[in-house]
Amino acid sequence: MRRNSRGSWLLAIALAAVAAALPLAFLRNQYNLILLTTVALYGVLTSAWNIIGGMAGQLDLSAGAYLGLGAYTTATLLLRWNITPWVGMFAGGVVAMGFAFLVGFPLFRFRIREVWYALSSSALVVVLQVVFLLWKQVGGPMERLLPSASFSLYNLRFQSYLPYYYIMLVLLLATLFIAYRIRTRRLGYYLLALGDNEDAAEVLGVDARGSKLKALVIYAFLVGITGGLYACIYGFVHTSFFSPTISMEVAILGIVGGLGIIYGPLLATVILVTGRELLRAGLGGRLQSLYLVIYAVVLILIALLRPRGLASLLGAWRKERR
Amino acid sequence: MSGEPILQVSELCKSFGNLAALNRVSFHIAPGEILGLIGPNGAGKTTLFNTISGLYHPDGGQVAFKGQSIGGLSPHAICKLGMSRTFQVTQAFEHLSVAEAIRIGAYNRHGERGVEAKVRETVAFFGLEKIQDWKCSDLGLAPLKRVEVARAAATDPELLLLDEAGAGLNASELAELMEMLKTLRRKRDMTLCVVEHVMPMVMGLCERIIVLDYGELIAEGTPEMISKNEKVIEAYLGRRSKR
Amino acid sequence: MIVNILQSVADGALMGCVYALIALGLSLIFGVLNIVNFAHGDFVMLSMYLTFWASTYLSLDAVFTPLITIPLLFGLGVLIYYSIIQKTLRERFVVQVAVTVGLMTFLRAFAQLVWEARPRALKFSIIQGNFPLGPFTVLLSRLISASLSIVAVVAVAMFLKYSWLGRSIRAASDDADAASLMGVNIRWTYAFAFAMGSALTALAGGLLMTFQQVDPTMGLRFGLLSWCILALSGLGSISGLLISGVIVGVAEALTVAYWEPRARSLIVYLIFVVILWLRPRGLFGRK
């Protein structure tokens, strides 16, 4: 295991270097930069989801809720008090975190069955969407534009997608590192045990509710920060950011990537989101929705044929135990 | 066997719907002893364990562990106080390896620094070196039962409740297990309470036995006394002849 | 004022009966197969589009289209069960969810591909129109839809209770192993339950189309709505389903009338979350 981990670190650093160098290959092509940024963004979401979904085995479908909260917090701070998104996105993370705590506290107390946890977390996204739709001071039916500027470091506005990509990449690496730290420490082991057998874990001293809450709150924090960045990238906030579709997609990518395996969700994201976006661009026109049909079929096929996730392919190849 | 009991159960009640699974059960466990808990199927032994270890909320009565009332505490809090248990139907962590499963227990009293050593020591104590990297889902019944005892022992409990740890083991596996349990008591000062159907194990291991039938305590005494007790024989044999 | 409130309550109650019909299909699938079907609402959406098609191209009135769509959806249910659902029965919960969410994405994208994103509605149905009843106005389409829904729910309840097939479905839902020992063909029963759950959405979809339009994103709303009703009623009580459907329908209608139309889903999910927190078994649940 020890020998192996050194190699893994080298591999991880090499891959990070490749990711950092990738944009140099097509600096002029904004489309490719958008694609890279999108993949990195989904990578953060799915890797963060892995903490609550993969390790703790809680099928969370509320990524969109925390994404939206982060986005709206960042935008509101900037628009009302001119507070820079650099601070705003962390504030967004904290708001998402607080909200996750409020939601998770009662949910985990009553040991709500996995199905109902999944559904109530999904309902949460829609609830927030409506709340922000009706909350005129902060949300409302119209898009809220962030201050436009061709270049403003303070407002996190850039002409090119290049800076966004690098910021997202840093966030992605941080997320992966946090997931790795959790996975190899007490909390990670506790979460895995809880995901497998809650009663058995409890009598061995595992605080089920506390551990799950920690996982949920960390996940919400990471997604909240991403939400702040998301708002800056798009240049506006809208209630459609509270998206049930994104929430489900994040979960499904996490599942087909490989539950609890650090690089699993990222692997699935890189392959599938890239594939999806290329398909979307390639098809276009009348066949606009065809890419989603194909994407859905691929997801179903992977889930059926590789129930342990895409990472299990790599795992079998490397003959490595998780 | 002196001093205060490590566990004092008084008038404990638990019912499911109209069915009283435990009816005013009272007994104690003295520090350092090995107490046997026997009774026919459906007598309420597992319910008793579940209620003591915090998985069930008692409907009435008191459970005091080391003089402190623990009725209504959650299982992990009870474990932190120094009580752990195994399960009659093995509750494995399917996706964890043997060493990782033990690690879950070891974290109870150890931080990141000490946990590795504790795991290694526990693995060695229970003779699990060869299978420590196996996934729990790949284990047969006998090793699985042993892993359950090992991970519970890794929490460093003062009181360990074993629910049919011997069921399904062959004679040599049983002898090994009994030896380990005796060593646990001698070297780690653990008090043990065992629910058991395997009579040789109960008779060979326990100093004192209590008998549960239909949720009530019907006898208490040394193995010899119990094996001659009319009520106990009635409970075990009488019911069979009535059927 | 009081007349208006009662009017909303009545409208909502009628709508709630159709909701109960949708939730009944879900309850069959969840109760029997123990599969969490996220795509159920999208079956409703698909049924609505098929109704739209059948009535546009075959000039069939929406009330009669279920004659075609019920067999269609039943067949689709069988097909999906054998090709997809059956393979996930022994898998972990998350894999089941991944598959049904994938199915949901598929159905929605398929609808967008075939019918495009804009909403579709029927121009005409023989049960459109309304008539006054004292101070109230009764929408004929809603009244008939609600009545047919109740008839269908009761019929399914009778079927489950008295027919041989229905009893084996209930046996399989209580304890699959025991049922299979008693000679129930579990695989076949599961397929039937799934197909029947899907076929019920065909009826609901046809009825909904007599007074509503359809767009491809509607599935999620119906899906969560029927899960909410199921959570409210708990498993195993058919009258509970009807009552819960009516509660949800009335809550929606009152929200639309007296607060804010866009907040209706808010109310539904708040009920859902509160019920999960306070009564995880539902109001009428057995298990």
Image: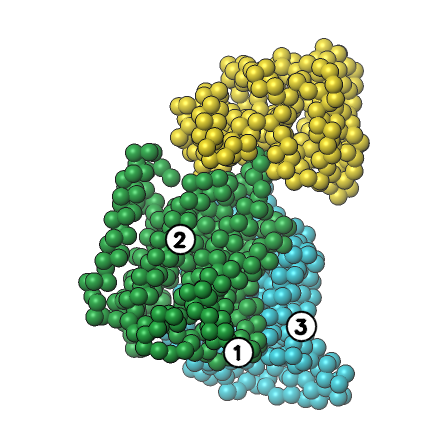
Near-viewer residue (A79 or C101) = A79
The chain shown in yellow is which? B
Name chain C's colour: cyan
Residue carrying label 2: A175
| Pointer 2 local density, CA inside 10 Å: few below 14, some 14–19, many at least 20 | many
Q: How many numbered marks does the figure carry?
A: 3
Q: Tell me where residue A262 appears, x and y as whole percent.
A: 38, 47
Quarter of the image for the C terminus of chain A: give it.
top left
Could you tell me the amino acid type at mark 2?
Thr
Near-viewer residue (C136 or C153) = C136
Q: Is residue C82 visible?
A: no
Quarter of the image for the N terminus of chain A: give it.
top left
Name chain A's colour: green
- Identify the mark at residue A269; answer none if there is no mark: none
- Identify the mark at residue A140; answer none if there is no mark: 1
Circle 3/circle 2 CB separation < 8 Å: no
Q: Earlier in the sequence, mark 2 or mark 1?
A: 1
Could you tell me the amino acid type at mark 1?
Gly
Q: Nearer the viewer, mark 1 or mark 3?
A: 1
Q: Tell me where residue B179 appears, x and y as whole percent.
A: 55, 14
Circle 2/circle 1 CB separation < 8 Å: no
